[in-house]
Amino acid sequence: MKFTKMHGCGNDYVYVNLFEEKLDDPASVSIKVSDRHFGIGSDGLITIGPSEKADFRMRIYNADGSEAEMCGNGIRCVAKYVYDHHLTDNTEITVETGAGVLTLILYPENGKVQQVRVDMGEPILTPTEIPVVAEGDKVIDEPIEVGGKTWNMTCVSMGNPHAVVFVNDTEHFELEKYGPLFENHERFPKRTNTEFVQIISRTEANMRVWERGSAETWACGTGTCACVMASILNKKTEDKVLVHLRGGDLTIEYDRATNHVFMTGPATEVFEGEIEV
């Protein structure tokens, strides 16, 4: 199997071009290639193939083989892959995901895509659609008992579930302790991704993320969008925020006129190779 290793802000995946390769069991392949000691090493596997309703279709498999609906960093790399590998010469493309069809603007330099702006669509706040068990019609700054402590969380879906928690210091936060407890909490029927956010100013924040099925990752695009939406809903920031992740920076902008969230960030190809699966 030929593959390309790529990352968006350190959120790295193994990419497989289904226009050229055939994968019978991508979930088990994802488990194998994601292993950082015995495989290629990644947060998961992403396939790029034909779509009946968009220019391309992406499917995302976590390191544990589970399938994710959407990956914001991954979709930027899909855009870079299809342009750099001459599957398209358009600088505006559509990509089908498990969370719907998204529109992407590509910013190439010298024939290679450097930055991608993604229309991430509308944030979902309805608890049953996230999903999160709740009594009200939204979960904003709501207390939750996790690990013997009371936290305040805001829940948002960007095609996948997110719980956003504001903390004083992300760098020294015990993510490995609390991340799994949030992920598997009974209030999240499909588990959840959890973002721990430190507000720096009205236009800047730090974030660390515990991803469902992949533990801590260096960045999470949908999570960064959820973090900014939660910051806006809690009146902590403006509508455009620069978010510092462990693997780099993403700019998130909420457009009130359309109720859409836009994410702009880098996409990087690391290397190409071949592996027996």
Image (tube, rainbow, N blue to C red):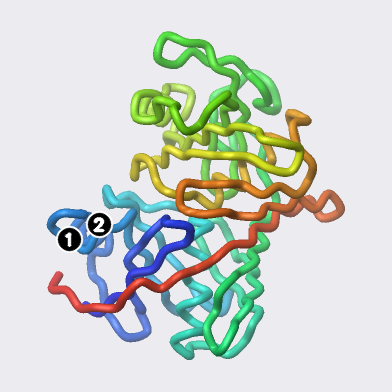
Residue 104: image location, x then y, percent? 63, 70
Name, please, the residue furthest toward the top. 148
Residue at 66 percent across and 79 percent down: it is 92
Residue 84: image location, x then y, percent? 48, 85
Q: Mark 1 vs mark 2: which is more N-terminal?
A: 2
Check the image and report above or below for 116 versus 92. Answer: above
Check the image and report above or below for 119 versus 126. Answer: below
How busy is the neighbourhood of tag 1: few (under 14 within 10 Å), some, or many (20 plus)? some
Question: Dividing the picture into quarters, in which one does residue 191 lie?
Answer: top left
Name, please, the residue furthest toward the right. 257
Question: Dividing the picture into quarters, in which one does residue 155 lie?
Answer: top right
Q: Which residue is mark 1?
A: 39
The answer for how far apart the CA atoms under marks 1 and 2 are is 6 Å
Is label 1 in a helix, a strand or a loop?
loop
Residue at 58 percent across and 90 percent down: it is 89
Question: Dividing the picture into quarters, in which one does residue 54 lie?
Answer: bottom right
Question: 56 or 11: nearer the eye?
Answer: 11
Give the residue type that dot 2 points to. Answer: Ser
Q: Are marks 1 and 2 in contact (CB under 8 Å)?
A: yes
